[in-house]
Image: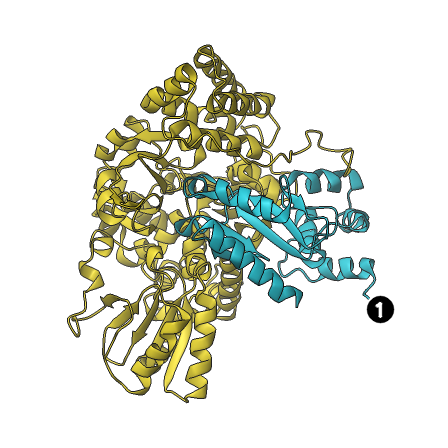
Chain colours: A cyan, B yellow
Amino acid sequence: MAEDIKSQIQRAINSQPQKTVTMLSCLLAVHDECGFIPTEAIEIIASKNDTSINDVWAVASFYTNFRFTPPAKNIIEICWGPTCHLMGAQQILSAVQDNLSLESEGDTEDGFVSLKYNTCIGACSQAPVITINHHPVHSISTDKILEKINKELKRKND
Amino acid sequence: MNKQFEILRQKATKRNEDLKSTVQIRVGLGICGESVGALEILNQLKDRIKSHDLSAVAYEVGCIGLCYAEPLVDIQKPGEPRIFFQNVTEDNIDEIIKLISENSNNFTGSVLGTLGGPSINGLPQIEEMTQWKYQTRIATRNCGTNNPNEILDYISTGGYEGLSKAISTMSPEEVRNEVATSGLRGRGGAAFPTAIKWGFLVNSPGPDKYILVNCEEGDPGAYNDKGILESDPHTLIEGAAIAGFATGANKGYVFIRHGHNGPIERTREGIKQAYEANLLGDNILGSDFSFELEVALVGESYVSGEETALMEAIEGKRAMPRSRPPFPAAVGVFGKPSNINNVKTLSYAPEIIRKGGEWFSGIGYGRSTGTAILCLNGNVKFPGMYEVAFGITIGQVVEKISGGAPEKWNGATLHRTVKLLQTGGPLGGVLGRESLETLLDFESMAAAGAILGSGGIIVGDDTVCAVDLVRNLVAFCQFESCGKCFPCRLGMTHLVEVLERISSGNGSPNDFKLMPIVGNAMAQGSLCGHGQLGFNPISSALRYFGEDFRIHIEENRCPTGSCIATFHRPTRTRPIASSGWYPGS
């Protein structure tokens, strides 16, 4: 049986490597563990940090990396920052969205891919850059990147 | 000389000598290398060494700065220079292994050159290449050479000598004086003299004081802070400890954006090793000085790089700027006096203390002493991270070091020229070709209306439309506005709408008047630089590329055809209310 979500959250919160524990550090730890912020986590984090659930929601809603529903099986992030923009990110965004039948960022209907826009992955010298399941991938051309995505995703699915 | 440190250094020297007697294979595994498959190459090399039972050791290093040549693999045989293979693929691995197993010097793969010794086999020397020749590597001296996960590597190259010297032979005041002599100024953007900033903290009451290291680095186009942390975290750790000693601070945070795993993991490992070696923690190297350091992570928020927002984020709250005064040196993180420095600033401290402030002040130009760590990217032949002494022109950096705009292929070779530069992050604005003449130093750049900022330089060639790029920059600023000050929150949104209208051919001449009105309101009514400088991308683009705007508005067309396609940008927003928000509400 899968681990109970509450104990999963507790484990994430209690195994943080750094000394200073805050609302934000707890949210990040839970997000890393679960892939999203379950509603159950908010209450646990509030009581851990001796604050209200309103305050925890306030922090969680501010940082754009948090999501509140389980992610799809695979996460693709595409950088749309200025360097990647100059190097063709918009074409990649269009092509990937067409390929996944998405209109903008979001999850595919089959729950296979979550597409997210990223403001900077930090590998600007290899622009345009995307990440596939958190691994940065330099993108040579839209065709190559679609091929790569399909290959990576297929490998994971097998 | 400190006895404890002497023992450490002997251990480091011994390790270094052992390493030198075997074949070393270094694989560049910064994020630039990782994104082109370096991890797979390193793993395969390790497997082959094991299966062939070779007397060689393969390990990861960070980014040497020559990102265009990644994945970079270099082989160093005992007593020989390093031989760099560029753009290595899995097909080259057999050859690399053969070089070691058969001890041959036959290369057919793409060799970049040799580094650290006389040329062999007529290979080019990297020291002679423009990408290297123009550089003065101080903060990045070990990047791409040292194993970032090995503290002894750092110590064997002079690491922690500065800290040891400071706590064993100098007073905190002498350390500050040395930094004052060096003329070191903040590399985060404001260029404020570091010794004076440290002085503010000294005068604040203790006992708890904080050194905050800013590696939020949300600026697209800049990756030098993360580059230093993922390539040589100990230079920052040592620098932070020196700052702690000089200011009487006993705690520190290295503030990194969540998700940048290379810098985060290597900094955490570095801090762990420094604690084990008693270079952090209680009574460092047997002295009275104690200093705690830990990594604090932040979620995705560009504004959290602003110093007061950074403190809010370390406390675990929304990264929204505070009103000043009180200033951080009086009331900082957790209400205690704090000093905030950029990663690059602190990374100079170890060498300044080790070699002296006079040495550092001899490098650079005028009041801009030392070096600038630049990230060149966009339409350039050789994108990378380059550390150059102040005093050369931006044109030399762009044209000589990074090779200028690359040719494009369209059935025939098309030569391209540099049209625009985007420096200092999205708020730094857009500069025209004429700014290539500008001298690289804080004063000259400010006079030319440019900001060196975080050191990112994005280059656009003559196929780039200024309106299209500015639309992207302003959309970025709009998405990243924290929402605290309404002129910034609403103004940015308004400006994006105007720019989208102009780029889709629906602009009106009135927009030329409208945009400065909105921009001016933002500059007047915002608490932090995000809103105050938020109009910079547009005002600078209007100054240098007014013609691009005019063609869009009057002739309803884009001069380069870049604005035709749909512009994808996130539509997510940060809810304004600081409480009472639930998903779906």
Q: In the visual, does B19 lie left or right of B415?
A: right
Q: In the visual, does B547 lie left or right of B395?
A: right
Residue appearing at x 43%, y 71% in the figure: B41
Closest to the observer, B269 or B13: B269
Residue A21: % across, % down: 67, 53
* SS class, disc 1: loop
Q: Please identify the quadrant where the N terminus of chain B is shown.
A: bottom left
User: How packed is label 1: few (under 14 Cα within 10 Å), some, or many (20 or more)?
Assistant: few
Q: Please identify the quadrant where the C terminus of chain B is shown.
A: top right
Residue appearing at x 60%, y 38% in the figure: B319
| Location of residue B222 with respect to A17 vertically, above or below | above
Residue B560: % across, % down: 37, 30
| Location of residue B211 with respect to B91 vertically, above or below | above
Q: In the visual, does A117 lie left or right of B134?
A: right
Q: Is residue B91 visible?
A: yes
Closest to the observer, B397 or A27: B397
Q: Amino acid at mark 1?
A: Met
Residue A152: % across, % down: 57, 62
Q: Could you tell me which chain the residue with mark 1 belongs to?
A: A
Residue appearing at x 42%, y 58% in the figure: B238
Name the residue furthest front. B411
Report which residue position mark 1 lands on.
A1
| Location of residue B560 with respect to B372 vertically, above or below | above
Name the residue furthest bottom. B53
